[in-house]
Amino acid sequence: MTAQPVTIPTTEIIDDLLIDNWELRWQVLDIFYQTHDKVRNFAKSSPYHRSIVKLCEHVISLLQGENDVNLHLILLAVYLLDGLEGTLRVFKKIEIANPPTDPEKFQLLEKKVLRKEPNYSFFNYFLFLFQENLSRDSTLNLSLKLFEAEELLKLFSHISNPQQQALSFKLLRQEFPQTNFNGMLISNDLQMIKENPELITCLKPPLEPDIFKQVETLALSHLAERQHLESMLEACGRLKIQAAVPHIRALLQDKDLWPLATSALGQIGTEIGMEVLIASSRSLFTRKKVEAAMLLAHYHQQPAAIECLIKLGTSHNRKVRKIALASLARTGHPQALNTLINQVMKAPAKSKKALLAVIARSKWSNVPETQA
């Protein structure tokens, strides 16, 4: 029986895919799926498959990197049209991998992914890139858009580059601020954190007393290691590890680490370092005022810090004023809200929108509902 001829869509159909009209988009996606279904039994060397590859490459050529607003749409389109091979073409277009030292090993991995062999999914593909130090910034950015939070935590735990790993955990927390990883991290006697101390930054308070004690011991042991110092400072501040205060206080003399140390001390709830920032807020130098405006937000439990930020929020220097008001909003303090509202009332029309956005983005859990 002679196979029925198949009509492959032309590149003109892409206009309907990219237009902001989901009724048209679904029609295009359905056509892609039906086309793939009709030609899947033809040889890869057939004219049909060559036409599909050509159409896929045209769709992919429109992609402007891993942050393209149409990334997920294009990924779905090429997958429906050309399966996993189309998805790999997108990855190559974005250039998510540095040239491998062992090309054959990398090619074998791709073949196993395409054949859908057990334990060879795109998760394993990205895992290989991170483990073999083949990843780029685009690898990190794309993975944040493709995987669930728990999968990302596992992926990023295997990044071999320390700087990239620290950045990846920071981006993970920013991308999934509501996700609580505590269950994964404290299981098996904190095994994941013991193997990878950077993961301590992904813990969220409160912790059970016995768990807190174990975490405290781990954090204190790593405060002496330069490799993990920045992460430990961040974790000590977020988890309010009081026992770390003497260690952190000593870092206030370090010209590179004092901002992080000050931030941690403020979050822990001490006044140590605050007086220096308040003194800096009176400096004639803008840089000093800006540093004070940025860091005093961490002392949100201290009335003197709030009062200083309120004063900086009325500065004639636009940069200082903007940073101080943003810091006030981060404190969630009732006085901060009053100050911001007063600034909105006084601000010119162009500035009102930005100030209202600052208020809207902030959490006002300390403000009574009648005031908020």
Image (cartoon, helix red, strand yellow):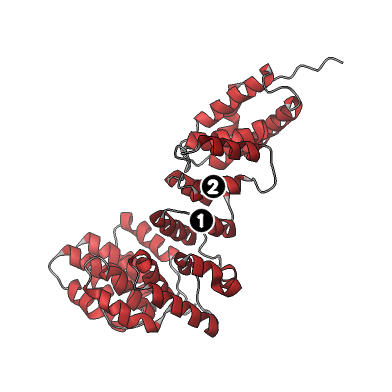
Determine whether, in the image, residue 40 is placed left or right of residue 208.
Answer: right
Q: Check the picture and name the quadrant holding the C terminus.
A: bottom left
Q: For this rendering, which residue is in front, 141 or 162?
A: 162
Which residue corresponds to mark 2? 128
The amino acid on which the numbered mark 1 sits, given as a three-letter code, is: His
**Distance Cα–Cα, label 1 vs label 2:** 9 Å
Location of residue 345 in the rendering, given as x and y in whole percent from the top left corner: 33, 66
What's the mark number on residue 262?
none
Q: Residue at x 19, y 67 (%)?
A: 288
Instruction: Examine the rendered structure and indicate whether residue 169 appears above or below residue 46.
Output: below
Q: Residue at x 65, y 37 (%)?
A: 114
Location of residue 340 in the rendering, given as x and y in whole percent from the top left corner: 34, 69
Q: Is there any visible trace of residue 192 in the rendered image?
A: yes
Location of residue 172 in the rendering, given as x and y in whole percent from the top left corner: 49, 58
What's the mark number on residue 158?
1
Q: For this rendering, which residue is in front, 349 or 135?
A: 135
Q: For this rendering, which residue is in front, 8 or 365?
A: 8
Residue 341 sits in which quadrant?
Answer: bottom left
Determine whether, in the image, residue 337 is placed left or right of residue 187.
Answer: left
**Mark positioned earlier in the residue sequence (1 or 2):** 2
Q: Are marks 1 and 2 in contact (CB under 8 Å)?
A: no
Q: Residue at x 57, y 48 (%)?
A: 146
Q: Residue furthest toward the top? A: 2
Location of residue 35 in the rendering, given as x and y in whole percent from the top left corner: 71, 27
The amino acid on which the numbered mark 2 sits, given as a three-letter code, is: Phe
Q: Check the picture and name the quadrant holding the N terminus.
A: top right
> How many labels were placed on the picture?
2
Q: Residue at x 48, y 37 (%)?
A: 94
